[in-house]
Image: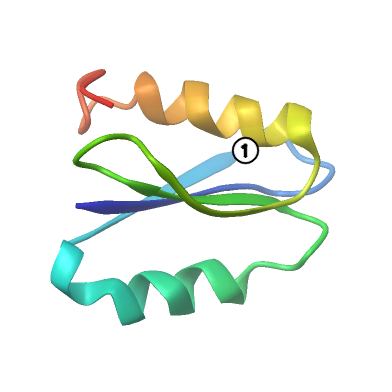
Amino acid sequence: MVYVVNHESNSIYNDIKHFSKDKMEDAQKEFDKFPKNDSTIMIRGVDGGLIKRKGEDNFVNQNLAYLYNDNETHGKL
C-alpha cells in the first residue's frame, strides 16, 4: 500500500487516502492536488518509508502520528 496524508493549512483536519502499490500514479495525483501550503506526505506501507513530503515539519510529523493511529493501518507502519 501507499498512503497519502494531508493536513489542511489553518485546520485541525487530517485526511488519509490508501492506494495499492501498483496505483502509484493515482497516489501521485492525490499528493499533487493539495496546495503547497498544506502539509502532505506520501508513505510506503511496506516499511513506513517517506516517499515525498511538503509543508511545515510539525504538521508533517502530525500526519505521521495520525497515520500510525488510523484504524485502517492498525499501527502497522
Q: Residue at x 59, y 75 (%)?
A: 33
26 with respect to 4 (left or right): left
Q: Position of residue 60 (x, y in %)?
A: 65, 36
How is this picture coloured?
rainbow
Q: Residue at x 37, y 69 (%)?
A: 27
* Quadrant housing the C terminus: top left
Depicted 6 relative to depicted 27: above or below: above
Q: Residue at x 74, y 54 (%)?
A: 38
Q: Position of residue 8 (x, y in %)?
A: 70, 49
* Among the 4 quarters of the image, the one containing residue 2: bottom left
Which residue has dot 1 on it?
13
Q: How many marks?
A: 1
55 with respect to 22 (left or right): right
12 with respect to 15 (left or right): right
User: Mark 1 is on which residue type?
Assistant: Tyr
User: Residue 34 versus residue 58: which sits nearer the camera?
Assistant: 58
